[in-house]
Amino acid sequence: MSLLREVLARIESAARTGAGLDAVARSLGLSRSEVDAMAEYWVRKGRLTREEIGGGCPTSGCGGCPVASNGCGANGGRPAPLLVALRPRRPDASTGAGTNGTGPP
């Protein structure tokens, strides 16, 4: 199995167990940036979907921010990070292919 496909398999497994990309990187002996790049490839190919599920700066301003108690300096003066989930696409029951209709790469 190619490393790229192994990363996809590990991400799919991590999605079921709740493990993150850091765990995927450690299990394969890769850097997080390498796993991020490979995950991005699978997002572009339609095998993974990206969903923003929270984080970022609140619309209420710094007063509603959990980091604000330590001051924005706690995050290096940057906005709070956005939490992103990667999820495997569900197969299309009619074709057996991914939901984008292309099937496996």
Image (cartoon, rainbow, N blue to C red):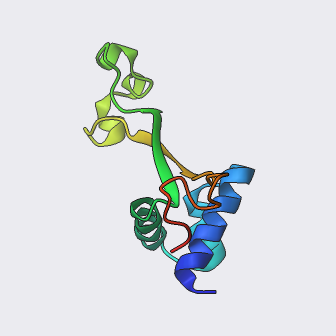
- Horizontal arrangement in the rendering, residue 101 relative to residue 59 (left or right): right
Q: What residue is drawn where x is 34% and y is 40%?
A: 75
Quadrant including the N terminus = bottom right
Query: Which of the 4 quarters of the picture holds residue 67?
Result: top left
Query: Which of the 4 quarters of the picture holds residue 66?
Result: top left
Q: In this view of the protein, which residue sits in the foreground, 70 or 40?
A: 40
Vertical placement of 16 versus 59: above or below? below
View extreme (left): residue: 77
Residue 85, position in %: x, y?
52, 46
View extreme (right): residue: 17
Vertical placement of 33 versus 29: above or below? above
Q: In this view of the protein, which residue sits in the foreground, 67 or 97?
A: 97
Q: How many marks?
A: 0
Vertical placement of 97 versus 87: above or below? below
View extreme (front): residue: 94
Residue 30, position in %: x, y?
53, 77
Residue 82, position in %: x, y?
40, 39
Residue 88, position in %: x, y?
59, 55
- Horizontal arrangement in the rendering, residue 79 relative to residue 39 (left or right): left
Q: In this view of the protein, which residue sits in the foreground, 103 or 58?
A: 103
Q: What residue is drawn where x is 57% and y is 86%?
A: 2
Q: What residue is drawn where x is 47% and y is 41%?
A: 51
